[in-house]
Image (cartoon, grey):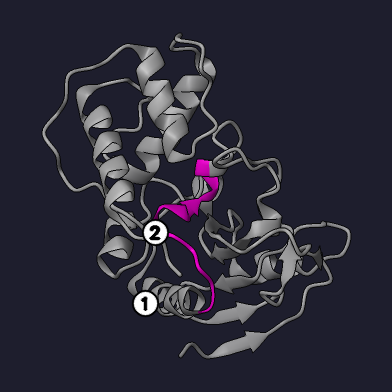
Amino acid sequence: MVHLIDRPSPNFDGRGADHPVDILLLHYTGMTCAEAALARLCDSTAKVSAHYCIDEDGTCTRLVGEERRAWHAGVSAWAGESDINSRSIGIELVNPGHEFGYRPFPEPQMACLIALCRDILDRHPIPPSRVLGHSDVAPLRKQDPGELFDWAGLAAAGIGLWPGEPAAAAIPPVAEVQALLRRYGYASPQTGILDQETRAVLVAFQRHFRPRDISGTLDGETVARLRALLTLVDASPQRP
């Protein structure tokens, strides 16, 4: 059970009855310190919020109740849905981000995140393939939580998916890779061309599932990991 500090944000509205909570979305704050991030998340003029914010020391602040729609995803999409705020729970992780000195996420913060995610997953039918980063749902705009976030460790704790280390695959035509990305959930173009937008989606995929190389290059290792993930999705029962 996570100890929560309540600091209510005014930045929320209703989810709507036709929007089940089926996405868990992770962010970094991208600000110089925790207090600056919390002040912004609670500033009515900023019009941004999240359900929770976890400091680097593991302190967890609840900003918006899970039954409400927090404003954390912005312009985003996943699996054909564009109103990600209505169907997600957003967690901000205090980290200065790429602009102010991006660094690894410390153990107390990750331990709190794992405990909080387990609590959330006990309350909501969120499939492992829908535990996502902000960059997954907004690859043209966002980088967070970024390549230093321990997605593999999170998956090892039973939260989300990890493709393992499959052998590199042959590189199929771009159109096939775009179709595989779309099948997983990414809003990938379906042009058959390795254009700038497709490269941005590849970078987002690599930040999450192959963080040692986030060049956006279409290579055999990226293809193998994408296929491995789709195999896991096909084999995994959906949460009740």
Disc 2 versus disc 1: nearer the observer: 2
Left or right of 47 on screen, residue 78: left
Q: Quadrant of the N terminus?
A: bottom left
- Single out the residue that lies furthest toward the right: 45
Q: Nearer the viewer, residue 193 or 185?
A: 185
Query: How far apart in space, not on screen, are marks 2 and 1 (Cα)?
Result: 18 Å
- 210 lies above or below 233: above
Quarter-wise, where is residue 82 in the image? Answer: top right
Residue under numbered circle 1: 111
Query: Which residue is rendered at x = 61% and y = 57% of the image?
Result: 31
The magenta segment is 123-136
Query: Which residue is rendered at x = 69% and y = 59% of the image?
Result: 19
Residue 47: say if magenta.
no
Give the image location of residue 178, x and y in percent: 43, 22
- 221 lies above or below 125: above
Q: Nearer the viewer, residue 108 or 178?
A: 178
